[in-house]
Amino acid sequence: MISLRQLRYFDALARTRHFGRAAELVNVSQPALSMQIKEMEAELGAPLIERRRNDIQLTPVGNEVHRRAQEILNAAHDLVDFARHGTKTLSGPLSLGIIPSIAPYLLPDTLPLLRKRYPELQLRFRETQTRTLVEELLSGELDLILLSLPLSHSEIETLGLFEDRFLYVTRRPRTAATDKRIALSSIDESRLLLLEEGHCLRDQALEFCNSARSASAIGKPDLGAASLSTIMQLIANGFGETLLPEIALHAEIGGNRHVRAQRFADPEPSREIGLAWRRRSARKHDFLALGEVLKECRPEPRGTAGGRTTY
């Protein structure tokens, strides 16, 4: 009978596609890991991997075994979670993944409140792009992720928290500001400054522009920045314009008098911020409690008194 240890070793090998890196991931020697994989193949009576010169590839059987192995490992992980945390809300270790266009704007207010209300919670963070977060959620490395919805996957459950509107940010003109909202279709995409490839915020901005006019008329920006802070500095110096999530408004613009943010005409483009976790997780009550804290800590939009649409 194959063991959980063998499944864990095989999962590491399937994800890294390298014996040395897999061994480091599970803290064993490479020969020990290789031996366990061979014993697992012998027990199953089928080859799981194809050994090549510089890497390894999973066989068709190996791919299916890996999928099922992840389900078993996640179930074992969730069983332990249930036993340890089933009776107490937000206690013990919790691994949370967050996309970069959310983390800097929600965490500063969320962390102190979590520490005050749930002092036994041991929160661990991972900030990276959506695709990586989803992979690590499914593999059991993360307990839940905070990202932009929708996210459709049969093994994942989601919870919407709040809508985050997009604002149009440009260099502040010398003339007096206007309260007039702007049409999404009036944006010059050739001047758009966006995050680099792989960020969902980039894809959303381009999708909004595509929806406002024919796709053939859209020119995708060739370059991208690693952070919204970099984009704000470029705009302040006259190098372009962007679509900025409203939750980032005060952190990225604040007292910067060189840029301005305007609201779009209805229907305003927006994204839904939410949580996602493995459907079979035993800690749903924890995730719902965390969601309430996140909603409470959402940065409140300012500068809208009297119907003004500029910031």
Image (cartoon, rainbow, N blue to C red):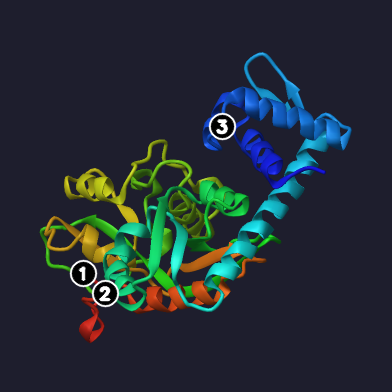
Instruction: Check the image and report above or below for 113 versus 171.
Output: below
Q: Marks 2 and 1, Cα distance to the nearest angstrom?
A: 7 Å
Q: Quadrant of residue 99?
A: bottom left
Q: Looking at the image, which is closer to me, 282 or 148?
A: 282
**Identity of the amino acid at label 1?**
Tyr
Q: Which residue is mark 1?
A: 311
Q: Residue furthest bottom?
A: 306
Identify the secondary structure beneath mark 1.
loop
Q: Quadrant of residue 277?
A: bottom right
Q: Looking at the image, which is closer to me, 270 or 62?
A: 62
Q: Residue at x 37, y 47 (%)?
A: 194
Q: Residue furthest right?
A: 45
Q: Marks 3 and 2, Cα distance to the nearest angstrom?
A: 59 Å
How far across and how far down the image is residue 107, in percent? Answer: 32, 64
How far across and how far down the image is residue 188, in percent? Answer: 37, 50
Q: Is residue 267 visible?
A: no
**Which of the two marks, 1 or 3, is nearer to us in this view?**
3
Count residues near mark 3 (Cα–Cα under 10 Å), then give few for <14, some for 14-19, many for 20+: few
Instruction: Check the image and report above or below for 94 versus 218.
Output: below
Of mark 1 and mark 3, the one earlier in the sequence is 3
Q: Which residue is mark 2?
A: 309
Count residues near mark 2 (Cα–Cα under 10 Å), then give few for <14, some for 14-19, many for 20+: many
Callout 2–callout 1 Cβ contact below 8 Å: no
Q: Residue at x 37, y 56 (%)?
A: 101
Identify the secondary structure beneath mark 3.
loop
Count residues near mark 1 (Cα–Cα under 10 Å), then give few for <14, some for 14-19, many for 20+: many
Q: Residue at x 83, y 37 (%)?
A: 61
Q: Which residue is mark 3?
A: 28
**Identity of the amino acid at label 2?**
Thr
